[in-house]
Amino acid sequence: MKIPHSKFWPFIHPTLILSMVLLLLSGCAKVSYLWDQGRGQLSLFWDGRENSEVLKDPNIPSEFKEKIRLVEKYKRYFYEHWNKKETDIYSETTILDQEAVTYLVIASPYDHIRPLKHSFPFMGEFPYLGFFSREKAYKYAQNLEEESNDEKEKWVTYVRPVYAYSTLGYFEDNILSSFFEYDDFALAELVFHELFHTIFFIKNEVGFNESLATFFSRKMTYEYFKLSDDEIEKKKKSYRDRDLLMRNMVTHVEVLNRKYQEAAPESKEEAKKLLDNYLSTEFLRDFKELCEQNKMDHCFPIQSQWNNASLAAMMTYQNKEKKLDQLFKAKKMDLKEFFNFIQKSYDQYLDSDEDGPFSNGLFQKNLKI
């Protein structure tokens, strides 16, 4: 264990300590939730074992050991590529007792598609709640749907498993057995993505940080696997396809919300009939046509089951990778030069009195938008 129990608390981020204090003033439900989250987070660390120890354990499946070796290999490549000092991230492995590391519960009203916001003092609002326990996630979702006696306060829920988890550099994260669900290419992209947060992070721009990590991790994965131009183009097409599908999902959510407003269903049953009718007609027709026209291998909108909560998850979709790619091409730099350019631009932003998010100014100054 990298941080003994007696020495752990001094390493906790100050905002987390303040959040804990404020949450104590926020009601029993939030205190209970925070306690479970804190205990779940700590267990990821306390249950971790040094990679060398896990690799010697005869009870660990050989395929798990191979994935651990790959993560270590990807980590070395990442820090050598950027000429950065290695951190202790991914030096231990935690074998989970469930398939996913956490489960997100998203809720939406039955007569309108919008995520239920959960407000926490100091930390702000979140369109979901995450649970380290699968059982508690489903129990919470069930309670949301069934407990209220007021029909108008009942919710539709969606529980989504999450296989990768990061503290965004606040702690030295462990390798999690849930990572092993990924193939070698996706695992490399995941590792590069999470490690990118350890070398560069923009304050108060969570969405753009994710876009940056996605952009650089994809480029690095192409380089690592020495993909041919044709192979890279095939990968890029799959990303473009998903982006196109996601943008169209957002459009259909907007159409559905207008239909809900016009129909004003008075019960879950009425709302479900409206939704099912829309999904089996306009929604199915449009996505079938879109996927056929673009020769998509994976048309997830018509291969998935939807309710208001899972559709609400689409509303948080943002994609700035396209603008980053445009900027990358406009600058005609290699990947390292482009990273240095982003870093220098951010340093200049911090030294200035510029208003607004860094990402907005970055694109406005360097792209004709």
Image: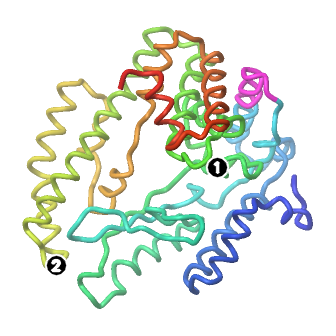
Residue range in magenta is 73-84
Q: Is residue 81 left or right of residue 163?
A: right
Q: Identify the residue at horizontal 61%, vertical 27% (top origin).
A: 345
> Residue 28 location, x and y as percent?
58, 86
Q: Picture coordinates of residue 259 (x, y %)?
A: 11, 60
Q: Position of residue 52 (x, y in %)?
A: 86, 41
Q: CA distance from mark 1 to mark 2?
A: 39 Å
In the image, residue 360 above or below residue 254: above
Q: Is residue 122 above or below residue 330?
A: below
Marking on residue 267: 2
Q: Amino acid at mark 2?
A: Ser
Which quadrant of the structure image shows residue 245? Answer: top left
Quadrant containing the C terminus in the rendered view:
top left
Residue for point 62% across, 80% down = 31
51 and 278: which one is in front?
Answer: 278
The residue that appears at 18% across and 39% down in the rendered structure is 287
Q: Which mark is residue 189?
A: none
Q: Residue at x 62, y 77 (%)?
A: 23
Tell me the quadrant of the picture where the N terminus can be found.
bottom right
- Earlier in the chain: of badge 1 and badge 2, it is 1
Q: Which residue is mark 1?
A: 166
Q: Is 271 on the left or on the right of 175, as rendered?
A: left
